[in-house]
Amino acid sequence: MMKKFVLAVVRGIYRLLFKIEIEGLENIPTDKNFLVVPNHLSYFDPPMIAAFLPVDMAYMAKASLFKVPVVGSLIRSFGAFPVKKSGNDISAVKLAIKILREGKSLTLFPEGKRVKTPGILGEGKQGAAMIAAKSGVGFLPVGINTRYRFRGVVKLTVGEYIDFSEYHDKKLNSEALQQITNQLLMPKIAELAGAKVYADKNC
């Protein structure tokens, strides 16, 4: 009940601060769990994803977010846990895999950091592909398009589920994981966010 109350409060606050537009909720699977993979613009992103996507999720967020006043308390209250060193926190990765294997969905920002330049996505890290392969889930790509200005438009676009079953239980090296990230994940997220990918010139 507390989580539902907090998320309702967050939705109310966001609707006061911004003009929220949401598209693609019909793309959210109802028969499976998945890894939610949005682009990352601001500290506003994690609470917004939690509040406006009707999915029971845990959240893998940068440890630094938990030090931000209000934001840290909010994201912890609805299931976020910290990951250190840009995704190289082994204990956090193991927890993420465990959560997904238990049937719950999880949110992870593939860029691993905020990219504040409008219309640009940063380099996608390998963590999302590795966690999906080891846990046996697919991806739900999400695009966030906004500059988070007071009463400005915040557009949240949910893309179609990306099946990842061909890679489940396969041993993927670093090169393969990065190729999957660059060619499968980041271009789709960029499309949904109305942005360009600069991580891989071949995308």
Image (cartoon, rainbow, N blue to C red):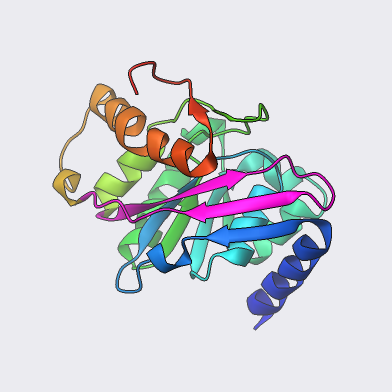
Looking at this rendering, what residue extends furthest in the top direction? 201
Residue 75 sits in which quadrant?
Answer: bottom right
Residue 98 spot, x, y in % from top left: 36, 58
Q: Confirm whether the magenta stretch covers residue 155.
A: yes
Query: Which residue is drawn at the image coordinates 59% and 62% (left, top)?
Result: 50
Q: Is residue 198 left or right of residue 168?
A: right
Q: Is residue 32 left or right of residue 28?
A: left
Residue at image coords 74%, 58%: 19
Residue 49 lies, in percent from the top left, at 59, 57
Residue 199 against residue 162 in the figure, above or below? above
**Residue at 65% from the left image edge and 49% from the top image edge:** 45
Question: Where, by quadrant of the figure, is residue 3 drawn?
Answer: bottom right
Highlighted magenta segment, given as a residue range: 136-164
Q: Nearer the viewer, residue 165 or 153?
A: 153
Q: Is residue 107 magenta?
A: no
Residue 184 on image: x %, y %: 31, 36
Number of marks in picture: 0
Judging depth in this view, the residue of 196 and 161 nearest the camera is 196
